[in-house]
Amino acid sequence: MVRTGEAGLSRVADILLRERTLTLVLRSLALAGTVTLLCLVVGVGLAILVTRTNIPGRRLLAVTAALPLAIPSYVAAFAWISAVPEVSGFGGTVLVLTACCYPYVYLPVAAAMRRIDPSVEEVARSLGRSPWNTFWSVTARQLRPAAASGALLVALYALSDFGAPSLLRFDAFTRVIHQSYRSSFDRTPAAVLSLLLVVITVAITVAEARTRRSGEHTRVGGGVSRRPHRVSLGRLRWPAAGVAAVVIAVALVFPMLSLLYWFTTGLSAGIDVPRLVSSTVGSVWFSVLGALLCTALAIPVGVLAARHRGRTTSFVEHASFAGHALPGIVVALALVFFGARVAQPIYQRTPLLVIAYAVLFVPAAIGAVRSAVTMSPVRTEEAARSLGSTPWEVLRRVTLPLAAPGIGAGAALVLLTCMKELPATLLLRPTGAETLATSLWTETGVAAYGAAAPYGLALVVLAVLPTLALMRSQRAGEGGVS
């Protein structure tokens, strides 16, 4: 806002009223809308197949369907563009982002499907409704909040993603902002377009929140703790399995095979082992620092939000989520401006990069802490207080240990997202430092696919570990319900 205000109203209006700006808005919204719609279809469809049908290989599908979450969009884009150069532009970007983002819908919808009380559906069937009518009138309504939250994440991701549109040469907001920032000493267009992108993302977030509030429903009673009846697909079992296999092949198998191909091709030319090691260490180091800072900031906010609701607590919690609506490249450019003008001692140093991670990802940690503390029994804390423990001792000895698994899952999620973050790392990393993401970006920029593959493969392997931890945590949390 400061950078934009310095340009003057006429200059800002000139940038906003350009035909190219309107085209950019329409292209970006079309990308986000198409990817969100496809992710809803794929994510909800896979969740239903895994949780409610007798599809062959259901357990294997339940695991593999979530693993594309570990593949950053720019790694998937590299895998596709290096193998099939024709996959570019709008269609290629839609393909890559859909393959990478559908787990954001699949995971919450699958979890919601396992929590649905099957007796409600049985009552609807006993009243004469067909299976299809029961699904749309009963089951789908209960899945709506989970699907809507996943769709919001997909839409924000598609608008804010930088790597895939850049590698696939599709002029979305993030690519044009980066080009404007890099190609000119005049940073005003980048600032104005960044602010416009922020307005669009905030508008989408507010619209989703209002829609969610208008569609809220409440279940009376505790329900039952048993598994719902699985629908027999009959002759459709194997065709359904074939469709699911195509999704997994596009989202997971092909990118991994492409990475392995270019990795073996690069072996003949030799691998820069010292650079690979230093990039891996850099990724782990910066990501661990980001996860630690986000978790440390999230614990007090999450505990207060779960145990001491009030206006101040709600304001702090909601304010922290503002950064989650900001694209990484916008946060990075804002901190470049801030570091160069105000915080020069930490500009292009580790603290500024870690602060960027906190701005972007602390909401994920807050959500995990709040949920974990909410699920822990209040009576245990009350018993500790009645035995003479101080509030600080109760927090340290009772609340945090009980919530530790959920807090750990939140830290794993932040660790994963920090590893995958590209624009903030690219613009704010310390001088001379490299990560797997930046090294991959550098080699891909000159079409050195064989040299880029080891960094992409190492990044995916590292990202799989927190992804598996998240999946294990989710299954453990659902065990008592399903």
Image (cartoon, rainbow, N blue to C red):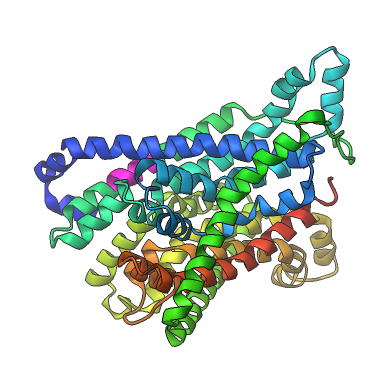
Q: Is residue 8 magenta?
A: no
Q: Quadrant of residue 240?
A: top right
Nearer to me, 303 or 471? 471
User: Farthest residue in the top direction?
Assistant: 128
**In the image: residue 466, left or right of residue 188:** right
Q: Quadrant of the C terminus?
A: top right
**In the image: residue 428, left or right of residue 373:** left
Nearer to me, 185 or 363? 185
At 44% across and 57% down in the image, what residue appears? 83
Q: Tell me where residue 353 appears, x and y as whole percent.
A: 40, 71
At 75% across and 37% down in the image, what residue appears? 238
The magenta region covers 195-201
Nearer to me, 312 or 83? 83
At 53% across and 76% down in the image, what residue appears? 284
Q: Tell me where residue 461 appears, x and y as whole percent.
A: 59, 69
Q: Quadrant of residue 223?
A: top right
- Whether residue 85 is situated above or below residue 185 in the rendered picture: above
At 45% across and 54% down in the image, what residue appears? 80
- Whether residue 74 is situated above or below residue 122 in the rendered picture: below
Q: Main secondary structure of the magenta part?
A: helix
**In the image: residue 435, left or right of residue 459:** left
Q: Tell me where residue 112 appears, x and y as whole percent.
A: 72, 40
Instruction: For residue 304, say whether it is visible.
Output: no
Q: Tell me where residue 344 appears, x and y as whole percent.
A: 26, 76
